[in-house]
Amino acid sequence: MTPLDTAPPSERLAELEADNRRLREALRDAHTALRASEERCMLLLGSQEEEAFAGAVSGAAPTVAHVVETDLSPRAAWSADVEGRITHVPAAWARAMGVTRESLLGDHWLRQVHPEDRAATSSAWARAVTSGSTYDAEFRVRSAEGRYRWMHARARPLRDAEGRTAGWHGVTQDVHDRRSAVDALRELNETLETRVAERTHELAATNARLQAEMGERERAEAALRQAQKMEAVGQLTGGIAHDFNNLLSGIMGSLALLEKRLELGQVDQAGRYIKAATSSVNRAAALTHRLLAFSRRQPLEPRAVDAHKLIVSLEELIRRTLGPSIQLEVPAAPALWSTLCDPNQLENALLNLVINARDAMPSGGRLRLETVNAHLGWDEVDGQGDDVLEGDYVCIRVSDTGTGMTPDVIARAFEPFFTTKPLGQGTGLGLSMIYGFVKQSDGHVRIDSRVGEGTSVKLFLPRFDGATAEAGGLTGAAQTPRAEGETVLVVEDEALLRELVVEILGELGYRTIEAEDGPAGLKVVQQKKQRIDLLVTDIGLPGLNGRQLADAARESRPGLKVLFMTGYAENAVFGHELDAGMQMITKPFNPDALAARVREMFKA
């Protein structure tokens, strides 16, 4: 057996349990053997005594002592008078006890009985004589060697013609060997029980120690996870702070310069500073969208998509991005299944993968964008996590012949702000954004890579049975749509943003009503005389959130159109698809985008 102080905890526990099982089996076998031995002995002894009784009762009192040798031990027939005084014992029996036959007659035989058994033996014999019932007792008798041996005595009364007791005939059997065997088995039984109890106690102590070790290990693992979590949070917040500080510096600097130029009346440079600030704002919005994608909380607009057609629509842009030194391959995809996802986010994901592949091939190479139907069976998803399900998928494989990645890099590839690119050449959010988008779309991502051979990234998006949307293209600038007499209720707790939305809609000719929170907005809605054609509301409102406000508003105004403004689509608010007549616009948005979305809702 493996020593307890060196074996692993699981092995120690298993060995102790095995020993415990063996001891219990031995104890059970000992019990069985003990019962069988007692039954055999009692059966044989009973048959011998019955034989002796039959011989004794069939005739007159024996006048000649006899000793019958058996395969177990000797026995002797004896007789007593009506008052229970011994009148006859075999001489050989007396010699075996080391006394004369006369010294056993009457009541003197009790002197040979062990002192501890004498009182009980005498009382049992007196009760039998008084009641005339069968005498049956076991006691110890001193032998000629001075040792005590166990005897089993049985006697029956002899009746006269009138049924009165006329005397006694009995048989005494030496049962010392049987009693010794029984005692030995009992001692073994008690020993086994003690050993089982000891091992059980040891097992319990070991189990308690193992539980303590497991608890300590769990606490250590929890502390490690917490440290890793804090390290990840620190890395995440540090990266966010770095990027946002750069963006805010651009915004603040541009606005400060713009203010100075306006004070000096130098308006000719205003456009440049406004564009610089706007560029920083757009970059900040893109950063927040990537973070939301990684956290799987970005607002998505899923549609049925033909992935191959979408890639073909991006082919020219991808070729310009790659440059002439990288060969692009887009093989045909006959009978490709559709998938349900946000096509704009899928485009962003593909462009991110293309840029990563380009950077991994500084000296040129080959990039292959392939779409195929794929079925993942249980053997392929087992061990990949609870969120990876078997079924049919559309697989988009982006493969390059670049430098490849080491296993350590692959393990951290999806971490936010992790990048192997030189400082200033990458945010480290590209792959994390892709990972979040695919997971949010109920798919999963795999990376296969070898250093010096290239990398293959596979996006698995669930199969969708439905009509696909045509891949869109760039459209020219359209005139900002204007109001046609509609009334819009704007509910936003951020005062500055509420004022901006009201001003934007007012300039477009809409009549606006504003409220600072959910309860205030609900009061306006419940005013039956007040016309409201559209509810524009933030989601994260105090009191009532935007979704609760919309549901309450539709109870009194069925079919009321609702436009949600949000930075992310939180599951607690959107536990299901948006109802008919509801849409969503993502913050930050420019005035033209808001105007177009509002006009679109009125025309729907």
Image: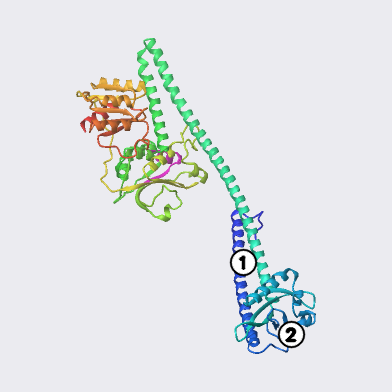
Residue situated in front as seen by the camera: 283 or 392 = 392
Q: CA distance from mark 2 to mark 1?
A: 43 Å
Residue situated in front as seen by the camera: 82 or 39 = 82
Q: In terms of secondary structure, where does tag 2 sit?
A: loop
Q: Residue furthest front?
A: 162
Look at 70% across and 76% down and name the residue there. 151
Crowd class of label 1 (few under 14; some 14 to 19; many from 20; radius 10 Å): many
Residue 395 percent coordinates (x, y): 36, 48
Residue 317 percent coordinates (x, y): 34, 37
Drawn side of residue 166 relative to residue 230, left or right: right
Q: Which residues are magenta?
A: 351-369
Query: In the rendered view, would you say 536 is above or below 52?
Result: above
Look at 40% across and 35% down and name the residue there. 292
Drawn side of residue 407 relative to residue 261, left or right: right
Residue situated in front as seen by the camera: 345 or 490 = 490
Mark whose residue sits in front, 2 or 1: 2
Q: Residue furthest left?
A: 484
The amino acid type, in three-letter code, at marker 1 is: Leu
* Quarter assignment of residue 321: top left
Instruction: Name which of mark 2 and mark 1 comes first in the sequence.
Output: 1
Residue situated in front as seen by the camera: 7 or 104 = 104
The quadrant in which the C terminus is found is top left
Q: Is residue 591 visible?
A: no
The residue that disc 1 covers is 27
The residue that disc 2 covers is 90
* Quarter assignment of residue 25: bottom right
Residue 241 percent coordinates (x, y): 48, 28
The amino acid type, in three-letter code, at marker 2 is: Pro
* Quarter assignment of residue 327: top left
